[in-house]
């Protein structure tokens, strides 16, 4: 087995930063250039996992020293060091959004589902839901301030079978009750306009508000319950991939910035192999 799929479920607001920008938000999250969909860069994921393993090495089975971690994921100070394990960017699968019924919904779109081999045709509706949906009410859903006309998914087994390659049945049963497949354009609009944006104050070392910036700056976060997927693959070695996925499977690791504020807790689930 040369690669395995992994699911990332966000447990607390997540800021995987792309650096400062001149836009509305001072510190935005990472997004795909061509779709503007949220993503997690492979280098950010790899660095967070490496940091976690080194900090908790005494509590992790199959690891006894930092050299083993660097063998798996590469050495920080040796640019020529080749890791045994590769990690892909994480793509968004489900995005949580406020719903007038059922508190919140998970949204996705045909473009995302097509990337995992699931074909969905929305026809003349704004979206589709599963039977026994917790968020649909009288043929429509209200997501944030948007009312969308929806119909029931015609071939539920088609979507479920495609998602089973990424999500275990217990989690899938929870998600499908809240899942709304909406048009690609609507999905883009919502993931651009409904992230969490917090205003913070920068304090200098003297304890006073920073004079150059006026102190105020904004930080963008992905909401908890966001779900990403990606791959972990073998670059070299023999059984390192199995060893590595056993180490990280089921672990909760902090990703991104603002760790001291409790941000960025993400649960990793190794869900499939090919």
Image (cartoon, rainbow, N blue to C red):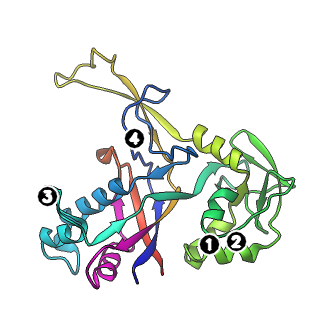
Helix, strand, or loop for circle 1?
A: helix
Q: At x 32% / y 18%, what residue is drawn?
A: 213
Of label 4 and label 1, which has the lower sequence position?
A: 4
Helix, strand, or loop for circle 4?
A: loop
Helix, strand, or loop for circle 2?
A: helix
Of label 3 and label 2, which has the lower sequence position?
A: 3
Q: Is residue 111 left or right of residue 34?
A: right
Q: Position of residue 129 (x, y in %)?
A: 76, 62
Q: Is residue 70 above or below residue 27?
A: below
The residue sitting at the front extreme is: 80
Which mark, residue 159?
Answer: 2
Can you identify the residue that label 4 sits on? 18
Q: Which residues are magenta?
A: 231-254
Q: At x 28% / y 19%, what residue is drawn?
A: 209
Query: Within 10 Å of the Cα at label 3, are there few (<14), some (14-19), or many (20+) other Cα atoms?
Result: few
Towards the viewer: 226 or 272: 272
Q: Is residue 32 left or right of residue 249?
A: right
Can you identify the residue that label 1 sits on? 163
Q: Is residue 132 above or below residue 61?
A: above
Where, by quadrant of the figure, is residue 139 drawn?
bottom right
Separation of residues labelled 1 and 3 (CA atoms) = 39 Å
Where, by quadrant of the figure, is residue 102 drawn?
bottom right
Can you identify the residue that label 3 sits on? 78
Towards the viewer: 270 or 236: 236
């Amino acid at each position: 087995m040369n690669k395995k799929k992994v699911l990332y479920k966000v447990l607390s607001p997540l800021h995987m930063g792309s650096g400062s920008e001149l836009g509305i938000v001072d510190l935005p999250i990472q997004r795909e250039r061509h779709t503007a969909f949220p993503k997690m860069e492979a280098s950010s994921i790899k660095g967070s996992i490496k940091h976690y393993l080194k900090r908790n090495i005494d509590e992790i089975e199959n690891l006894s020293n930092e050299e083993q971690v660097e063998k798996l994921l590469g050495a920080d100070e040796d640019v020529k060091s080749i890791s045994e394990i590769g990690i892909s960017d994480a793509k968004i699968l489900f995005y949580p959004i406020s719903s007038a019924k059922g508190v919140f919904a998970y949204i996705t779109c045909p473009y995302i589902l097509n990337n995992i081999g699931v074909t969905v045709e929305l026809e003349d509706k704004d979206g589709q839901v599963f039977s026994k949906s917790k968020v649909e009410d009288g043929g429509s859903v209200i997501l944030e301030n948007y009312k969308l006309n929806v119909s029931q998914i015609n071939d539920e087994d088609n979507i479920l079978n495609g998602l089973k390659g990424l999500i275990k049945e217990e989690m899938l049963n929870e998600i499908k009750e809240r899942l709304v497949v909406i048009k690609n354009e609507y999905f883009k609009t919502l993931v651009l306009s409904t992230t969490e944006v917090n205003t913070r104050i920068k304090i200098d070392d003297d304890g006073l508000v920073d004079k150059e910036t006026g102190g105020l700056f904004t930080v963008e976060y992905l909401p908890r319950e966001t779900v990403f997927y990606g791959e972990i693959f073998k670059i070299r070695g023999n059984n390192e991939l199995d060893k590595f996925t056993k180490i990280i499977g089921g672990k909760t690791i902090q990703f991104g910035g603002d760790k001291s504020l409790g941000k960025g807790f993400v649960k990793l689930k190794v869900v499939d192999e090919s």
